[in-house]
Structure formats: structure tokens, C-alpha cells
Image (cartoon, rainbow, N blue to C red):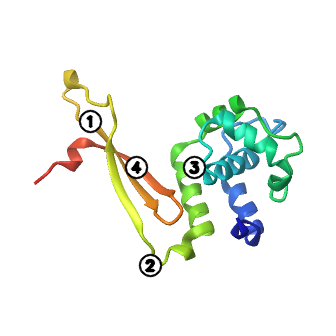
Amino acid sequence: MEKWSKSKDELLVLFNELEDPIIDHHKKYPLNEIVFLTLYSCLINVESWSAKEIVGNERLDFLRKFFEFKNGIPSHQTIGRVFSLLKQKNFETFFRKWTFLMFGENYDGKQIAIDWKTLRGSIDKSKNQAASISINACAVDNGILLAQMKVDGRLMKSP
């Protein structure tokens, strides 16, 4: 995690670019704190919203090196609600910039795995709709998902 401390100012600028979906600026937890907690939790393989809340409370001193967390760690319900309100394209743009800031120069010449999965239950035979497919790009060395895109199965037909 030493890379995090080297780019603290760059992180702050980048996090402030993310469009906040909640209009009330008197809210208890700023968007940048919620997103930072979530990204940090993902990097240490914490998946559920509840576990992110627990990790946040356990590692609050570390997290405060980057953001104030004046009101502590939000509940798992708050974290999940905020992420459900974020605009997907806006967050994707932010996430790409963050990934490059954090890991971009470290991946020159390293392996990036591309895979795809058919999303279970996405076929609708009554509407003649093909299955949806999720295409993922992952940094092999530390298992970070760099990009993910959902595509219509018809785009993936075999020759």
C-alpha cells in the first residue's frame, strides 16, 4: 500500500472529480470517503457491504491518512445505497483514471487477462433475446479488475 501515500494529493484531486449523485451537501458522509473506503476494501479482497463497514471501523486510523472521516465509517446500507445511485459511466471514467494513477506505470509489459462469462438467466427465448456476456480485463499480478463491459451475446458469434 505504499503507492497510496506517494500519490495522496493526486488521489484527492481525482476523488473530487467524481460526480456526487446526492444533492444534499449537508450529508453526513462525503462521497469521496465512501468511494475510497470501498476501493480500499476491494483491494484487500473484502466483498460485501457489511464487511466493508467492519474493515472501515477496524482500519479507521489508516483511512484518515487520506480523508477526514469526521463522522466515522458509514453503515453498510449507506455504502450500498450510494453506489446504487452512482452513474455507471461516470464511475467507470473515474475508476479508469484511478486505476491508471495507482497502477498504470506498473503494468508496462505485464500480463493483463481478458475473459468473458455468460450471465446466468440473461437469455429471454420469448423475446428471441441472446444471453448477455460480461467481458473482463484483469491485472494478473495483483488480481485487480481493470475494466468490465456487458455486451449482447450476438456480438460474440463464432465464425
From the viewer's side, name the closer residue of 69 and 44.
Answer: 44
Q: Which residue lies under the disc numbered 2?
A: 109
Q: State the separation of the CA atoms marked 3 and 1.
A: 25 Å
Q: State the separation of the CA atoms marked 4 and 2.
A: 23 Å
Q: Nearest to the eye among marks 4 and 2: give it.
A: 2
Q: Which residue lies under the disc numbered 3?
A: 91
Q: Which residue lies under the disc numbered 1?
A: 131
Q: State the separation of the CA atoms marked 1 and 4.
A: 14 Å
> Mark 2: which secondary structure?
loop
Q: In the image, what residue type sits under mark 2?
A: Gly
**Could you tell which of marks 3 and 1 lies nearer the N-terminus?**
3
> Mark 1: which secondary structure?
loop
Q: Is residue 57 above or below residue 111?
A: above
Q: In the image, what residue type sits under mark 3?
A: Phe
> Mark 3: which secondary structure?
helix
Q: Nearest to the eye among marks 3 and 1: give it.
A: 1
Residue 95: where, in percent of width, then height?
A: 57, 56
The structure residue drawn at horizontal position 69% and vertical position 70%, both measured from the top left corner, is 3
Q: Nearest to the eye among marks 2 and 3: give it.
A: 2
From the viewer's side, name the closer residue of 76 and 46.
Answer: 46
Q: State the separation of the CA atoms marked 4 and 3.
A: 13 Å
Question: Which of the labelled discs sits on residue 111, or is there none?
Answer: none
The structure residue drawn at horizontal position 31% and vertical position 31%, both measured from the top left corner, is 122
Please indicate whether residue 127 sits to the left or right of residue 108 in the image. Answer: left
Q: In the image, what residue type sits under mark 1?
A: Ala
From the viewer's side, name the closer residue of 8 and 55.
Answer: 55
Residue 124: where, in percent of width, then height?
A: 25, 26
Q: Is residue 11 above or below residue 31?
A: below
